[in-house]
Structure formats: C-alpha cells, structure tokens
Amino acid sequence: MASQFDVIILGGGPAGYVAAIRSAQLGMSTAVIEKDKLGGVCVNIGCIPTKALLHSAYIARLLREAKEFGIEAGAVKTDYGVAMQRSRKVSDQNSKGVEFLMKKNKVTVIKGSGVLLPGRKVKVGGDSHEAKKAVIIATGSRVKGLPQIGLEINKTTVISSDEALFLEKAPASLAIIGAGAVGMEFADIFHAFGTKVTLIEALPRILPLEDPEASDALAKSYKKRGIDVIPGAKVKKGTAGKDKVTLEVEANGATQKLEVATVLMAAGRAVNTENIGLADCGVQVTERGFIKVDAGLQTTAPGYYAIGDVAGPPMLAHKGMREGVTVTELLAGKKPHAIRYDNVPSVTYCHPEVASIGLTEDQCKERKLDYVAGRFPFSANGRARGTGETEGFVKLLRDKTYGEILGAHIVGGHASEIIHELAVARENEYTVEEVELAIHAHPTMSEAVAQAALDSLGRVVDM
Amino acid sequence: MATNVYMEALSPTMEEGRVAKWHKRDGDAVKTGETLAEVETDKAVMDLVARADGVLRQVAVAEGQTVPVGSVVAVIAAPGETVGATAASAPPPAPVPSGSGKRETGNVATMTAPAPVVVAPLPATAPSDATRVKASPLARRMAKEAGVDLKLVTGSGPGGRVVKKDLERAPSTAPAPPFPISRFPLPERSAAPYDDVPLTQIRKTIAKRLATSLGPIPHFFLTTEVDMERASEARDALNKQLGDRGKVSFNDIVIKATALALGTHRACNAWFQEDHIRYWNEVHIGMAVAVEDGLITPVIRSADLKSLGEIGREAKDLAEKARNRRLQPNEYTGATFSVSNLGMFDIDQFTAVINPPEAGIIAVGSIVQKPVVLDGQVTARRRMRLTMSCDHRVIDGATGAAFLQTLKQMLENPLAMLL
C-alpha cells in the first residue's frame, strides 16, 4: 500500500507530534511514523514518568518532616513498585492524550520503523509513503552506556533510566554515573525510597552546565541529606557481577573501590541516526553525530528537515517542540519568529529544583561581558519560610550598561515554574527594571525574582 | 474669536519649519503658553506654543510636513465657538525675537501680508502616528544611550519591532567614536540608478552656510605640530583629581588654550562685517559637534574665563543637547572663533571651513606617538597637528602664525594656562 501526504514525520516524540499537529492545523495532510508509543522518550520513559516519581519522593520527604509542621504521620513506609505503577499510569494517560490529539487533528499515524528513501519517500515495512512537501526527521535520542570501561548496560546490575523507570523495588545501593539532570533526579528519587546513593560526576562539579552557585547549593543539599557526591571523579573500571557491581573510582588523587547493588548510567545520550537511510538520501551529520541543518531546519538534502534531539543540542523536549512548530510554519509559507536558542530554559526537577536561562556567570566572564550579579536567597522570602522551602536563591546576571538580563539562575522550590517570568522577559528584551517594575504578589516565591533584580541595581529592599 | 496658529520663526535663520510632532490634537483644550507641537527648524527641534486659550481646531499640517514661516497650521477656537473653513482673521504674532535682525525683518515682512490660507478640514482618519515606534525596552535603552533615532531603524522582531540585534553593528576593531557618526537617513538601496532624497532642514542650512564661506572668503591655512606629552600628563592628573566629578578631554584642553591664546591675540578674535571688522573683547568658542544628518557648533561662552572642569561639563552637556536636537538658538549662535576636532577618527590633519562671520577656525588632528629628536636623542612623543583656517580679510599670515605659536606654547606647557 502506498500513500501520499504533504508532510511525513519520522518519529512521534515531542518534536514530531507537535510538528504533526501544527502541520495539520495549517491545512497540510500529515502522517507520523512511530515504531513504539506516541509521545516518545519524553512521555513514556523520560520527562513525564520521572516527574511522577519525583513527586512520590517529595511526599515521602514531606511526611518525614511533617512533625515539625504539627502533623504526625507515624513511620513512613515507601514502596517503589507502587510509585512506579502510578508513574506508568501517568505516562499511559499522556501517550493516549497524544493519540487523541492525532485523531482530533486528522493526522495519520503509521506504526512501524521508517526508512528514508530518495524522492521524499519513507518506507515502512513493505509500504512506501511519499511526501509532497517535506519529510521531517524527528527520531530523537537514547541512553548510552560506557562499554569501554566495562559498564555496558546489561539491564540488571548496570541499568539506564529506561530500566530504572520499571524497577519493582528500589535497590539497596546505587551508584549513579553522571550528575546532569537525569543523574540528579534519580539520586533524589531513590534516596527518598531508602536507597544508599552515590553520585559520581567526571567534571569538577555536579550539574556542570549550570551556574557554579547552583551546583554548590545542590551539592550542599544532597550531602546534608546523606547522598554521597563525588565530583571530579573518573570511573577507571567497572566489574559487573550477578548481583553487584564493583567500581574503581579515582578522585582527589586517590582511588577508591565502591561496591553497589546497581549502577545507573546517566552520562549522555546518543542520537538515533542509524538505519534510517540518511546517507542514501544525502542527509549529512556533524562531527558530533547530529544531523546538519540550516537556519530553516532543512538538512543537506532538499525536502528533508530535522527537528528535536537529532537536530542538535540542547536536547530538550521543549526545544524540539518549538522546532516542530517553526519547521511546519516555514513549510506552510509563513514567517515564524526565529527560534532563540540562547533563550531555552533548562530545568532539573530534583529537590530543591534548579532552573536557568541564558548565560552562567562563568560564560559572562569568558565573553568578557560587563555584568553585575543580583542575588536573593529564599531564606529571606516570607512565603518560602512559611512552606519550609528556604533552600536556594534567585540569581540574575545583568548587563551593566543597558540592564539586559544576561542570565537567570534559580535554585529552590518551584524554580521550574518561576523561571518563565524570566523567559518572557528575555524573549521580549525586558531589562531588570521592567521585571522589577512589574508588581509581584506578596507573599510569593516569585518576589525573590524582583528582589534579585533590585539587588542587581543596588537597591534590594528585603535584605 | 478664533486665533490662527502660525508657523513661527523660531530661530533667526528659520524660513520654514517641519512639524515633527503634535502635542495637542484636534479638539484638545489649550492654554496660552502650552506647547502645541514640536517644530524642526534648520537648527533644532523647538516648541510651537499656543498664543490664546481655547480649543485646537482645523489642524492643517500633518506630522512630518514642512510649511513656510507664516503659514497657518491650525486654529484656536474660543470654547464653544464653531469655526469656518478659513480663519485668517487675527494678525500673525510677532516672531520670537532673538539674534541679529536682518533675516528676522524678512520674516516679519512675509508675515505681515499672510496669504489667506484655506484650512482644509482634517480627513476623517488622522494621519498614522509616525512618532510611535515599536521597540523592545532593551532596544529603547540602547538607542537612547547611543543617540540613535529608533524611527530610522528597521525592526526585525515580531510585527517589525526594533530589537537588540537591529542596533548591533558588525564589531569594529577601531575604538568607538565618542559620538555617533553622522548618519544620513538614506533609503534602502533600490533598483533605480539613483535615489533622490529631499534636503532636511539642517542639510539645507549647512549647504547655504558653507557656500557663503569657502567661496567668498579668501581662506588660507597654517599648520603646526604640537607636543602633547605634558598636556597628556596634566590631563591624566586632572582626571584623577576630578574622580567621578567629570572628565577633561583633550578637546576641552584645546578649547581652553585657544580661548586664552585669543585673549592675547585679539586680531584673530574678530568678525568680518562687510564695512567694518568687529574685534571681540569676549571669547566665545564654537565647538563643532557631529549630529545625525549633519553638524552644529554649540558655543562655550567666555571660555577664557572658565575652568577646564567647567568647560568639560559644559561641552558634554551641549554635545548631548546637540545630538538630541534640543539646542536653543542662544546656545549655537554668537561664537567668535571655532574649534573642530576629528582626532577621534584618526585624522592626522585637515582644514576646516570658516563659520562666517568668524575669522578663524582651528582643525584638531589625532594625537599620535612619533619619533622626535629631543636634546639630540630620538624619543617617542605624543604629537598633535593643528591647522588654522584664516579669513585673509581679517587675519594676515604673520598675525595667524603668532596666534598659533602662542597656542602651541600653551599646549606644550599647560602650566602656562594658569598664568
């Protein structure tokens, strides 16, 4: 069976399904090819289920600390299996939601693995489908192990997030390799479920892409909670046994042996560019393996576009979603707002949460920018004191001459929600003064943003 | 009774005016003395004020439109009064008196017999407000600091909004000039072989004024090179002393030294007045300032009597006003001698055109390190070239040379300025 569409999208993850909906809205006949569940990694084995588990972890911690708030919860028992089952339900609901959206927008969903053919065609099994306007590649990425040091993912003792999300029981001990967003979140989850967690990071600090002050705040918080944090560490060798893994870790000039029940690999992701016919269609990849795209997201092969993780960093669902909208609007002959890749918020949903946008202070220094940092700690915020979420701060980096918000860094409760005030401000080129002039409700966590803006101007009120 | 609102002569040389912006709209109540509109004259943007109380009616000139002095631009009706199609009933107001009289009389003559201007009723749809510019807060701030007119910037943001990147130019290796380079608002390059752009008021004035200078005035030029080593040291020391109370620039030092040298060389501090020469006892130095689309010479009055700090502050203030086109006529007329500086553009030496009726102008080049023989030794010294343009009808070769020699000595020995 062969069919024709205006637009064919390979991959039904966040970038692909958003592109499909926008494409259909713009009146183009659209098909999405998905080999697994709609929603991709994000909905099924990424963003969504981890947020469900993190909330379970949050409740566990809340109940343990409830006595101070006048509530006796007794001995708190946790069951990872139950939390996991709940997270699966959440994922399934979301995946079904995407299915519903495909139907609602009359997008054809083709189940199976697609392979690109020249002439804007995609083969799925024995069928060939032709795109009149464009083929959009949105095949995403997957976790990767470190086979070179003996840590190939064996799905029992050496696992990735893919397996961690389906465990029936929290392991007794867990070493997490990589302290980026994934590593930080699983450390938070498993520690709350009673696992002894060791967090190992090769770079000198955890959350290496965030502002150093955010990294320091999280390292302090995790250590206080009893999570072992080893930054600047090199895993020299890993030996995976039947029910344990031995790691040789070199840090601070000394080598230590670590024996854990499970190792969770959380060091980077690999893009899905193999076996989809890229070379045959003339689609080239960069040195780092991403698909080469121009400013309009077109690949080196005319008529073939790429969006989401395969099209390059940052590998974040919301960046792919925006690319999905932009590419289809371009195909429909519209003039979409250019994507500002320097204005993509980054969020780690561990506790306390970490959210940032724009440049870190180190990047400001590297670029020799004339900047001023304004800070405000949640310990001085009335709302945060009330809820007991006094960890963390808001830090704004302001250009000295014009007041441009060069970067914003938030550590604390609800940081993932608060950051958007600054995303809107930066997208519209508001300066710290416009942010401060907007009246912030009292008492709210968001007041810390206005206070940090004031601090950068040298006139903080509440501190 | 309705009162006509005329395009008034807001400066001594003004012959026509462009309504830059209406502050009041048709139907607005106005009071005597209130600003009705901003008018761009040949020199600056000035306020056109109400000469009667009432209601503004029959606005006949749209923003951006140029009309001759004496034209009726609107009518002020008494409250409750309905006004007819023509309203040239009251005599025009006397022009604002300022400066020398000749042209002013001309203006009055034009206006004593005003043509009965037929005031067309305003079209139902008011002309779109060209003064409203879409720009992000950051872009607004950057434009303000850089003295860029946002109206001239093409916006690339949503809905044609001017954003940061529209104001950022390709990075230049040269140090940024201390003021914006004259940017004539040229239209986008078109397919036609050429584009005709009407002269703006300031351009017309420059054309007229300079043609009455270099042509009729017998110019001659004198150049000297000045050792600026000690002046540089003195400047550094002064700025250290001043701290955040301001900064003294080389230009301020040249202005001060020129003013002092003119005090002892009165022959150069003079105006050529056709049948007589006016030798000035006061020293008022005109300072050429590049502005968007041209240049203007605000005046530092009695510069010989002012301290360097005062000159520095005043020069900064006047330059800023000039760039914002907010100079009042008394701030750019009456110079007895001028200084023009292109040193910040790495110009070694140039000749400036005399600003009549003045008899001379000093053109200041950049300060460059050069090998110089001093006490039989070759050493590196900071040097600066000065070129004086003289009106030979007033200044002879030796007269100009003597003045220039004093100026040179003063700059080379800045302590002499204290004598």
Image (cartoon, coloured by chain):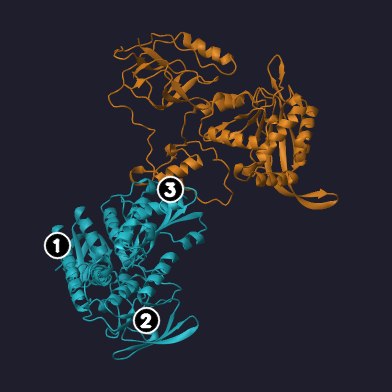
Kind of residue at disc 3? Lys
User: Outermost residue toward the bottom?
Assistant: A242
Task: Name the chain under label 2.
Answer: A
Can residue A103 be spotted in the picture? yes
Q: Is residue B318 left or right of residue A452?
A: right
Same chain check for tags 2 and 1:
yes
Q: Colour of chain B?
A: orange
Q: Is residue A27 left or right of residue B301?
A: left
Give residue B253's position: percent from left, percent from top: 69, 38
Label at residue A146: 2
Can residue A302 be spotted in the picture? no
Give residue A8's position: percent from left, percent from top: 22, 63
- The image quarter in which residue A346 lies: bottom left
Label at residue A100: 1
Q: CA distance from mark 3 to mark 1?
A: 41 Å
Residue at (43%, 41%) from the top-left corner?
Answer: B153
Of labels 2 and 1, earlier in sequence is 1
**Circle 3 sits on which residue?**
B164
Give residue B63's position: percent from left, percent from top: 39, 27
Residue at (50%, 34%) from the top-left corner?
Answer: B324
Label 3: state its secondary structure: helix
Give residue B214's position: percent from left, percent from top: 65, 26
**Which quarter of the rendered picture does the C terminus of chain A lie within?**
bottom left
User: Outermost residue toward the right?
Assistant: B376
Label 2: state its secondary structure: loop
Kind of residue at disc 1? Phe
Q: Which residue occupies the foreground of this view, B139 or A249? A: A249
Q: CA distance from mark 3 to mark 2?
A: 44 Å
